[in-house]
């Protein structure tokens, strides 16, 4: 966009253009997910003649899910981690547009958000074998906790706009996402463990339903992560303009 007062190019995030783009990507994602079900051939068929069907099966799976303490704990942790990632992604655009006044630098925040995932993925297997899932997740939690307290401090300490404050912000973001990346990569192995625990306790094969319920909460967390930024803006009476 061109600033009418100065005639210089101005980088502005236009919400009205984000919506149609999101709709297009959602439609594409739907057909891709649909294709994954049609292009896969099941080669092993189980005898499902004794399986519970209908509404009774749904309530049975819900009961199994919510009586599995490990699964419930993992889901709560997932809600927090996924909501954190999605909320920071949305918040970064606002911070760099209205605080740092430089939307072009938001790509740095994007890099430090995804870089930990790229770094952790290739080595997570070796790290898990050496330290164990519990110790590795505890270390990641510690890193994110330190980053969280640092981020909280930034909410109360006024830092002048400039290169230093931007560096501090990005460093805190990196610390948050480093711990979060360990969890995000390891969580799928933990989900499998929790489903196996349910089978061990109940003897019922409900892995598909249990995973579906867990996946629903992941999607819910993504929505919460996006919404919490909007709720925060409403809470502080945010008005787009010179004093934003």
Image (tube, rainbow, N blue to C red):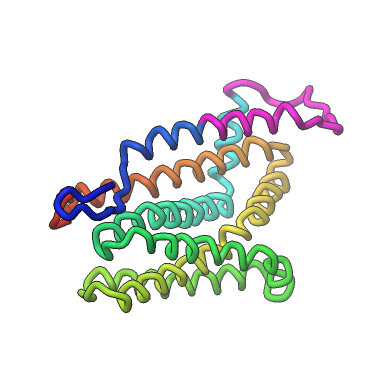
Relative side of 219 to 169, left or right? right
Question: 238 or 59: which is nearer to us?
Answer: 238
> Which residue appears at 63% of the width and 60% of the height?
186
> Which residue appears at 62% of the width and 40% of the height?
210
> Which residue appears at 63% of the width and 33% of the height?
32
Question: 175 or 59: which is nearer to us?
Answer: 175
Q: In this view, does 38 lie above or below 158?
A: above
Residue furthest bottom as drawn:
164
Relative side of 219 to 200, left or right? left
Residue furthest front as drawn:
7
| Circle count | 0
Inspect the magenta stretch and tell me whether residue 229 lies in it: no
Percent x, y of residue 166: 33, 72
Percent x, y of residue 90: 37, 52
Percent x, y of residue 35: 68, 29
Percent x, y of residue 234: 20, 47
- The residues colored magenta run 27-55
Quadrant, the C terminus: bottom left
Relative side of 208 to 95, left or right? right
Q: In this view, does 146 lie above or below 13?
A: below
Residue furthest right as drawn:
43
> Which residue appears at 30% of the width and 69% of the height?
152
Inspect the magenta stretch and tell me whether residue 49 lies in it: yes
Q: Is residue 213 above or below residue 163?
A: above
Question: 164 or 44: which is nearer to us?
Answer: 164
Question: 1 or 186: which is nearer to us?
Answer: 1
Q: Is residue 118 above or below residue 21?
A: below
């Amino acid at each position: 966009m061109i600033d009418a007062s100065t005639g210089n190019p101005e980088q502005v995030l236009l919400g009205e253009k984000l919506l149609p783009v999101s709709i297009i990507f959602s439609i594409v994602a739907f057909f891709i997910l649909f294709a994954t079900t049609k292009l896969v051939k099941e080669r092993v068929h189980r005898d499902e003649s004794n399986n519970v069907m209908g509404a009774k099966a749904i309530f049975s799976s819900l009961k199994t899910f919510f009586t599995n303490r490990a699964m419930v704990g993992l889901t709560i942790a997932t809600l927090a981690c996924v909501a954190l990632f999605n909320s920071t992604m949305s918040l970064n655009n606002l911070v760099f547009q209205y605080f740092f006044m430089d939307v072009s630098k938001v790509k740095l925040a994007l890099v430090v958000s995804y870089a930990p995932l790229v770094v952790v993925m290739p080595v997570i297997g070796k790290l898990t074998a050496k330290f164990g899932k519990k110790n590795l997740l505890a270390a990641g939690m510690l890193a994110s906790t330190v980053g969280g307290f640092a981020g909280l401090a930034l909410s109360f300490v006024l830092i002048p706009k400039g290169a230093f404050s931007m560096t501090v912000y990005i460093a805190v973001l990196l610390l948050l996402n480093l711990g979060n990346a360990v969890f995000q990569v390891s969580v799928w192995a933990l989900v499998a463990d929790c489903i196996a625990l349910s089978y061990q306790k109940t003897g019922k094969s409900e892995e598909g339903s249990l995973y579906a319920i867990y996946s629903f909460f992941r999607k819910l967390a993504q929505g919460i992560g996006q919404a919490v930024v909007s709720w925060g803006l409403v809470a502080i009476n945010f008005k787009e303009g010179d004093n934003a």
